[in-house]
Amino acid sequence: MSILDKFTEQASRGIARKTSRRSFLTRLGTVLVGAAAIPVLPVARSAGAQSGEAMSQDPGDPTSCDYWRYCALGGLLCSCCGGSATSCPAGSEMSPVAWVGTCQNPADGRKYIISYNDCCGAPACNNCGCNNNEGEKPAYRPQLNNGILWCLGTEKQTYTCTTAIILGVALDDAG
Amino acid sequence: MARSLSMTSSKTGQAGKWALVLGLAAMVQACSPAEEEATPGDFPEPLAAEELMVVETLPADYPDHYLVVGDWDHRFSVIDLTAEKYPVLGNIGTSQESIFTKSATGFLTASTYFSRGFYGERTDVIAFIDPTTLLPTGEIELPQGKRGLFVPVNGMTELIDEDRLLLVFNFTPASSVSVIDMENRAVIAEIPIPGCSLIYPLAGRSFATLCSSGSIVSYTVGDDGAAASETISERFNDIENDPIHEKYARLGDIDYFPSFDGNIQPIDMSGDIAQPLDPWPLVSSREHAEGWRPAGWQLIAALDGRLYVLMLKDGSNGSHEDPGTEVWVFDAAAKARYGRFKLETPGSYIAVTGGEAPLLAVANKENGIDVYDLAGAHQRTLRISYNPAINWLYALK
């Protein structure tokens, strides 16, 4: 948690120094989305998305790179290695910080913010590798970049695989 | 055997016949051409006994067609692009997310190790590697746990001021740069670079970094290693609509960055402050409409006034890291395309070697390395190991 506080503080300071007020607020929103994920990501919410009744609203095969949530996933799928789109395999540790993408659900047409939390500390099991980059930005906008090993704030930092967890519905950027 | 034969006197004739058949078969086998016994013949002297413990070394002055290849199996391979079958001359062992750097006097690797392999106490080190033996000769321990762990890309570890300073990009996720005095082999400072990523060398003791704001920020390193100055450029990078890749190629003092939407952004790095120049298009209007875009990971290389860019047709949101299918060659001074050629196999990494017979190396999507001449004639496909996962090509000159 302290690492994220420091990140948010420094990122905010840096962003405030270098951007206009309006774009600062847009970007602060992006940072805060990531921040909100850390303490409040409830297991219950993700379990609901996978329950029998909700299956039709979350279509597709989570072991396939074409699964709608993976639109900005660059890495190995936890769902092919003992985990799932929303959980880490046994023996690994989930990182509290991640990059985010915005993916459209083909079932309900909504654009969801997806948090691509890495699982860390166990050997990688390379069954399913994906290189999807919708909306992905270069490393100078790290919150939207999937080339970074996001095993930060974890005790173990080797890369195992990546999840794709719904944070919420994307707000319309009316510009 | 003889006793059992005599016990059945009525079958003696038959047994004898079988003995003859088997005996003849044995004789035929002994005399068949496939099993002719070798004799000294023309070689009256045996092969000499050989020396044990011989280890190869590489030449002090590498030929122009050598290249260093990084891959996810914890190694950097020194390879010969003109080899017909097995190009590897030797491998340097490292960790994951290691970065290779060439200095005027040797090689450096930046690595991150855990005391129990996948977990345990973390150690970040710069190792000095002798280019002729490929053995480590020394190391500098970095501030623990700070070194950025990225898919290998330029700008993670850079030398400036004629190799007097080594800069290492940290990401915790706070961004900063560790400054290492190479003469004393000591970490002397850490410069925070909030909101920015990666290191782009400028002249002397200066470096620049690309920022989330759309600017490039230039720092000059003071004698104590701390930032003596910081200059923020005008915003030039339209990150929402046409961001520049963080990968580039250098011609003279200008760094060329391809952009997502098909432009090239030159930045003048000749002084101590980075100066973005006017971008120009890599694609005509028609080509842009057809979706031609730069694509790949290590997607641009440069040599002798020309840029070599990996390109893909029908580009879309998210295609900027797909393997390119063609190489387009640009004359940087003329700001115009000079030529283009199709790749044997689409690829995501391109590097160029110079000298009298320059070569282009493309790491393709099947993890082979395709070698071309500068006109695009395919020379050979090399494999550096059984199933490598190549992650960067390090040109040496």
Image: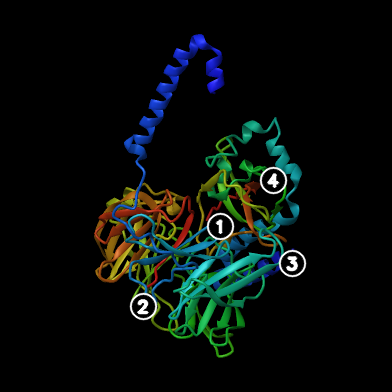
Q: In the displayed structure, would residue B310 be above or below residue B106?
A: above
Between the C-alphas of marks 1 and 3, the distance is 21 Å
Screen quadrant of the C terminus of chain B: bottom left
Q: Earlier in the sequence, mark 4 or mark 1?
A: 4
Tell if the residue under mark 1 belongs to the same chain as the one under mark 2. Answer: no
| Element assignment for label 2 | loop
Q: Is residue B26 left or right of residue B340?
A: right
Q: Amino acid at mark 2?
A: Asp
Tell if the residue under mark 2 belongs to the same chain as the one under mark 3. Answer: no
Q: Chain of mark 3?
A: A
* Residue pointed to by mark 4: A87
Residue B264 percent location from the top left of the image:
36, 64
Q: Amino acid at mark 4?
A: Ser
Between the C-alphas of marks 4 and 2, the distance is 48 Å
Q: Amino acid at mark 3?
A: Ser
Q: Nearer the viewer, mark 4 or mark 1?
A: 4
Q: Chain of mark 1?
A: A
Q: Nearer the viewer, residue B105 or B186?
A: B105
* Residue pointed to by mark 3: A2
Q: Earlier in the sequence, mark 3 or mark 4?
A: 3
Q: Amino acid at mark 1?
A: Leu
* Residue pointed to by mark 2: B253
